Amino acid sequence: MIPPIVDPPAAKRREPLRVVAAGLVAVVLWASAFVGVRAAGTDLSPGALSLARLTIGSLALGVFVLARREAMPSRSDLPLLVFYGFLWFGVYNVTLNWSEQLIDAGTAAMIVSLGPVLIALLAGLVLKEGFPRPLLIGCAVAFSGVVVIGTATASQNVSAGLGSLLALVAAITYAAGVVSQKPLLDRSSVLVITWLGCVIGAVFCLPFTPQLLDELPRASTSAITWTVYLGVFPTAVAFTAWGYALSRSTAGRMGAMTYLAAPLSTLMAWLLLGEVPPWAALAGGALCLTGVIISRRGPRP
């Protein structure tokens, strides 16, 4: 079979666009997840919501894994795979859900946005990706936006102390999950790594089964709808899109892109939940966007 003739410069331009597009899909869906967690959390406890979301995500991804007959990772990758699934899908979801029962969606998103700073640092140290100047400058600018938004919104909630701490734990586990996922993607497909991570997270949440069985029959239609949405889109679709982008870029630079989730989730919470952010939060969102643009101006991986 004769391979198609392509113009090399054009091909090089298309590849980064696909990577950026996949990253943006993941970030937008994750931004909506903060709103979904807040809405579904009115009827479902943190652990029950995590179990339901991850179970739905595992089933959705499992259908495609079986249809494509994806090869499984080697046994040598099992410890890292368990670590990644336990932290990012398990601990992250439970702590985020818990935090959003105490603070609003926008505040939680701002605090979780600290994750990219941790990702850049961990990727530079653990994955030897280095510390490009545009990445560091972009992270600093975006981080200042997070501080502005966090300061502006946290004062609205009397339970911000514990909620903010839980969101910080979510940010830490999210960062560790991204960095541990990167080497797995170098050896296995995006789809199978995402699916196995989701399954491992669901197994971690199995102790919450009695709560889910007790709360689900009494949950509103809206809460159930949001839970299904969380399982299919911010989990199955978003994590697969993220894995595709991460496998073709660096953890540090993809992590910087997730700063977009904070202003987007704040806007969505404003429109869908009536959680109106102060004007200072909007200024912080502009700083976040500026930081992402700066971080993307470095040399392509």
Image (cartoon, rainbow, N blue to C red):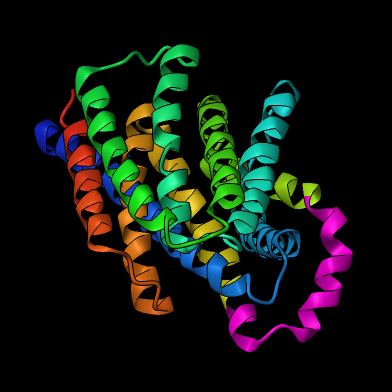
300 versus 224 height, above or below = above
Residue span colored magenta: 205-225
| 61 displayed left or right of 271 | right
Whole-percent x, y for residue 208 in the image: 83, 59
On the rendered image, what quadrant is the C terminus found in? top left
> Would you say residue 231 sits in the magenta stretch?
no
- For image coordinates 62% across by 79% down, the residue present is 223
> Camera-side residue: 189 or 111?
111
288 versus 209 height, above or below = above
Q: Place residue 81 in its image quadrant.
A: top right
On the rendered image, what quadrant is the N terminus found in? top left
- For image coordinates 84% across by 67% down, the residue present is 211
- For image coordinates 28% across by 51% down, the residue present is 21
Q: Is residue 44 visible?
A: yes
Whole-percent x, y for residue 143 in the image: 31, 36
- For image coordinates 15% across by 38% down, the residue present is 13
> Would you say residue 207 sits in the magenta stretch?
yes
> Camera-side residue: 25 or 7?
25
> Camera-side residue: 228 or 133?
133
Whole-percent x, y for residue 108 in the image: 48, 53
Q: Is residue 2 visible?
A: no
| 29 displayed left or right of 8 | right
Whole-percent x, y for residue 133 in the image: 21, 18
- The secondary structure that dominates the magenta segment is helix
| 70 displayed left or right of 204 | left
Q: Place residue 270 in its image quadrant.
A: bottom left
